[in-house]
Image (cartoon, grey):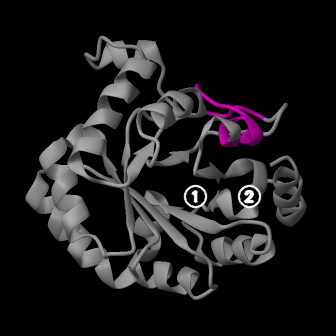
């Protein structure tokens, strides 16, 4: 079951990212490289990480007009990421163009509602629906656009899976029982998220901030 765990290497330090990935490589299915890593290390850094032999989830959450997003993804094609993210709020045309521009083997998934947001946060930016309803709306739009799946919290993945049986569901914000919530407001344990329908689990600080990242990854793997 370790194949469903992607460790989030949210750091600007390439050496640190490589060190953690090397330690946990036998107990995770891939690595997630986000915006801070990419801005600090660029495509060259991604290639160095890919050389470790683990699938790369490139989590850049692209959101712009369709043509710009398509061209950005075309520029990323040489990296051949396993998974790539865009924002569902960019609209159907943007998601369609993102999928068309991506390498054939890359799963394009749309971020619905960030796990750092709750209902009051959505209301503050003019979204009247609660997170569940907003995720459902954006998931339906993503499915219509023909992309591979969505990013959502564990709280919404069961409903998304029921509505989209063949969808690919990325669930971040998972924490082991008793773990520190950090800046996550809508979270779930790894085992519960997996049972609810998560295709992959994105886990960062519970592994990367542990005194022994490999032991932490093995402990989480054992719960799945």
Q: Which of 70/223 is in front?
A: 223
- Whether 192 is drawn above or below 57: the answer is above
**Residue 54, position in %: x, y?**
62, 77
Q: Which residue is mark 1?
A: 10
Query: Could you tell me which secondary element the residue under label 2 belongs to?
Result: helix
- Give the mark nearer the N terminus: 2 vs 1: 1
Q: What residue sits 58% from the left and 44% below the top? A: 172
* Quadrant placement of the N terminus: bottom right
The spot of residue 49 in percent (x, y) is 57, 80
Disc 2 marks which residue? 208
Q: Are marks 2 and 1 in contact (CB under 8 Å)?
A: yes
Q: CA distance from mark 2 to mark 1?
A: 9 Å
**Is residue 90 in view from this perspective?**
yes
69 falls in the magenta region: no
* Residue 199 x, y percent position in the rendering: 58, 51
Judged left or right of residue 186, residue 122 is left
């Amino acid at each position: 079951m370790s194949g469903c765990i992607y460790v989030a290497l949210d750091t600007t330090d390439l050496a640190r990212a490589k060190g953690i990935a090397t330690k946990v490589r036998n107990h995770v299915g891939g690595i997630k490289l986000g915006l801070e890593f990419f801005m600090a290390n660029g495509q060259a850094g991604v290639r160095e990480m890919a050389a470790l032999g683990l699938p790369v989830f490139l989590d850049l959450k692209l959101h712009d007009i369709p043509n710009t997003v398509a061209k950005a993804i075309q520029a990323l094609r040489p990296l051949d990421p396993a998974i790539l993210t865009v924002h569902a709020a960019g609209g159907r045309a943007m998601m369609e163009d993102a999928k068309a521009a991506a390498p054939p083997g890359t799963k394009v998934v749309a971020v619905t509602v960030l796990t750092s947001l709750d209902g009051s946060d959505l209301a503050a930016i003019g979204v009247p629906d609660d997170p569940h309803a907003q995720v459902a709306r954006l998931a339906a739009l993503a499915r219509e656009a023909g992309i591979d799946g969505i990013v959502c919290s564990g709280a919404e993945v069961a409903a998304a899976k029921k509505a989209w049986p063949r969808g690919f569901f990325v669930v971040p914000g998972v924490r082991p029982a008793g773990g520190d919530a950090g800046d996550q407001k809508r979270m779930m344990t790894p085992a519960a998220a997996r049972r609810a329908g998560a295709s992959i689990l994105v886990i960062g600080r519970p592994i990367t901030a542990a005194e022994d990242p490999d032991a932490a990854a093995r402990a989480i793997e054992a719960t799945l």
